[in-house]
Amino acid sequence: MKIYSKKELNNYSLSLTYDDISLIPTQVSRVKTRSEVNIKSKFLGKELSVPVISSPMDTVTGIAMARELTNSGCIGIVNRFDSSLSELFSNGNVIEGIQAVSVSLTAEDELLEKIAANNLIVCIDTANANNAHVLQKCEEIKKRYKVKVIVGNIAHGGTLRQLVDAGADAVRIGIGGGSMCTTSIQTGIGIGQVASVLDSYFAREEGKLKIELIADGGIKSPGDVAKALAAGADAVMLGRMLAGTKETPGEVIKYNDQLFKKYRGSASFGVKMKGEFIEGEETMVAYKGTVKSVINAISDGLKSSMSYLNCESLEELKKINTFAVLSTSSYLERLPRK
């Protein structure tokens, strides 16, 4: 079996997803238990206990979710689709625990001034950052306000320098990889998430660019979080893994004696206006309890992965250079059987 370096994996002939690769321990680990592993990091100047950012979807991140994620040492980006933003600024003061909000390309100065006054991170929430209007909006915000700006999304690093030149501080990487996203099917755009992260990582490193990378989409488990970070991401953005928790917007629905909550893509029928092009799905997910329990499970899984790999910190994980490409049978062999 061939063990691939990060560079070799980036040059692999096929577009790779998280299911296509595995991290390979090649050293005797000095880590006794996962409790010795430190996964704290900084993202856009914020101290994170776990490198997780919530997706600004209307069924994932409202005010309650953003606040609880802050309490858990993560970042929640308040969505722009429901009444969360207007509620946030209704009394002139930001609710405690909010760190980031999402805005559209048409966000007005009044809203941006309130965001800047409260030192919040701005996420320009679009599906395609490779767009002149996104670059222009980013430039305008950075010129007028002292705020950190996240843009997205991109599928590879080809335009990373242009995003940096426009003032972007971070970028969401991945097009079509989310479980509720049908962009790749509807448009034919997008590549595997591992391929996207790797290409963007090397574009940043080789270009000596200052921008933080968010792996956005396709992450289903703590193991995928570890793979994304080892591939070069600075943080991961989660939607489905956080969906169905107590803190997500929406009511708990009881059906056949089981509890569910609604989960949908930002370009789904439930979000889009009538007559707009649909690039997302809508579904029900099982109720999961508190988001804190989900974050704790991610933290434990990530730390365990790092203990196998002889990594005591995220900086060491990012230097991992031993990957395997899995056959379909090899992947299936790893799945639990009943």
Image: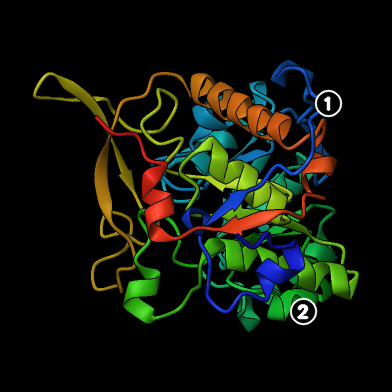
Name the quarter where the C terminus is drawn. Answer: top left
Image coordinates of residue 126 in percent, x first then y, are: 53, 65
For label 2, count other residues whose C-alpha is less than 10 Å away and answer few (under 14), some (14-19) or many (20+): few
Per the image, label 2 sits on a secondary structure element best described as helix
Name the quarter where the N terminus is drawn. Answer: bottom right
Image coordinates of residue 333 in percent, x first then y, are: 38, 45
Query: Which residue type does callout 1 highlight?
Result: Arg
Circle 1 residue: 30
Circle 2 residue: 162
What residue sits 39% from the left and 19% below the top? 289
Out of 172 and 327, give the one closest to the viewer.
327
Q: Which mark is residue 198?
A: none
Query: Which residue type does callout 2 highlight?
Result: Gln
What is the residue that sits farthest to the front in this orientation? Answer: 1
Out of 184 and 315, give the one closest to the viewer.
315
Per the image, label 1 sits on a secondary structure element best described as loop
Residue 75 visible to the viewer: yes
Out of 100 and 14, give the one closest to the viewer.
14
What residue sits 61% from the left and 24% below the top? 300
